[in-house]
Image (cartoon, grey):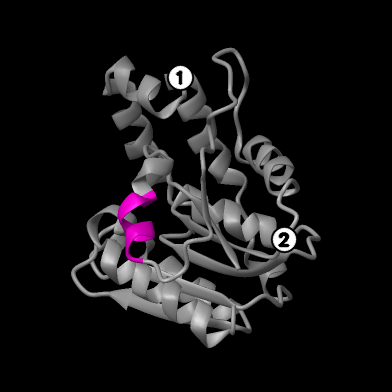
């Protein structure tokens, strides 16, 4: 079973290196969410989701999507699109409804003061990053996910206060899910707690016979 990793905003595919190192499964693919963007393109969550759909459509074998933060939101969005090859989901630090206005405003303030080289490193412009975060105000997955049948592992860091309640809401609306709270973990669990993250992936694959 192939495991396809989707990074968070502010990360790149290299953020999964240590998680992959600790996996029992070596059939993996870490995608770049922003690798094909040009600087003059508009960007929103829906645009990013459409681009991701085109990428995963090229995978001609069964696979699992595993995403963190933005990658987790996209993982959930992909599960609502027909795909016979998508067999399961692993999400960390996911939101299924619009983040609070305070969090979005705080994020936007941070983006406005970050140096240009930060955005160049992740493959976005400052404008694109702001457009993307602002598009989260239209996020509403809770109703549609109630009918989503795929097995799902939900995780969140114990200290990830911005996403902890969302993790509980997500697990409660899914019929085939298991929630794990990582002790002392913050938001970027793939970087901060790679062994613990990989353990959950390994357990998920074993439990469901993948």
Compare marks 2 and 1 and give the one earlier in the sequence: 2
Residue 108: give x, y in percent of width and height: 38, 31
Residue 125: give x, y in percent of width and height: 46, 19
Secondary structure under tag 2 reads loop
Residue at 71% x, 77% y is 149
Q: Which residue is mark 1?
A: 125
Q: Is residue 119 left or right of residue 135?
A: left
Q: Is residue 133 left or right of residue 192?
A: right
Give 145 or 34, whichever is nearer the viewer: 34
Residue at 58% x, 84% y is 208
The crowd level at tag 1 (other Cα within 10 Å; few <14, some 14-19, many 20+) is many
Give 15 or 132, whichever is nearer the viewer: 15
Furthest residue to the top?
40
The main secondary structure of the magenta stretch is helix
| Region in magenta | 16-22
The crowd level at tag 2 (other Cα within 10 Å; few <14, some 14-19, many 20+) is few
Residue 179: give x, y in percent of width and height: 43, 79
Distance (Cα) linking label 2 and label 1: 34 Å
Residue 163 seen anywhere in this rendered image of the structure:
yes
- Image quarter (top left, top right, bottom left or bottom right) of the N terminus: bottom right
Q: In the figure, 104 relative to 159: above or below?
A: above
Which of discs 2 and 1 lies nearer the camera? The answer is: 2
Residue at 23% x, 57% y is 192
Q: Which residue is mark 2?
A: 61
Residue 97: give x, y in percent of width and height: 55, 58
Determine if the magenta segment contains residue 51. Answer: no
Residue 162 seen anywhere in this rendered image of the structure:
no
Which label sits on residue 152?
Answer: none
Give 181 or 23, whichever is nearer the viewer: 23
Secondary structure under tag 1 reads loop
- Image quarter (top left, top right, bottom left or bottom right) of the C terminus: bottom right
Q: In the figure, 66 relative to 133: above or below?
A: below
């Amino acid at each position: 079973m192939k495991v396809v990793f989707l990074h968070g905003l502010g990360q790149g595919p290299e953020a999964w290196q240590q998680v992959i190192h600790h996996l029992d499964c070596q059939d993996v693919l870490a995608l770049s969410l922003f690798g094909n963007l040009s600087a003059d393109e508009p960007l929103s969550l829906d645009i990013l989701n459409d681009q991701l759909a085109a990428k995963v459509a090229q995978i001609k074998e069964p696979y699992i999507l595993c995403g963190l933060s933005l990658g987790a939101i996209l993982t959930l969005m992909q599960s609502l699109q027909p795909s016979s090859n998508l067999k399961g989901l692993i999400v960390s630090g996911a939101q299924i409804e619009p983040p609070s206005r305070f969090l979005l405003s705080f994020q936007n303030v941070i983006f406005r003061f970050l140096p240009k080289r930060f955005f160049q490193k992740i493959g976005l412009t400052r404008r694109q990053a702001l457009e993307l975060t602002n598009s989260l105000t239209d996020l509403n997955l809770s109703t549609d996910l109630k009918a989503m049948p795929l097995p799902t592992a939900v995780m969140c860091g114990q200290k990830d206060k911005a996403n902890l309640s969302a993790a509980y809401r997500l697990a409660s609306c899914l019929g085939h899910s298991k929630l794990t709270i990582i002790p002392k973990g913050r938001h970027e669990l793939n970087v901060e707690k790679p062994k613990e993250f990989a353990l959950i992936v390994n357990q998920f694959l074993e439990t469901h016979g993948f």
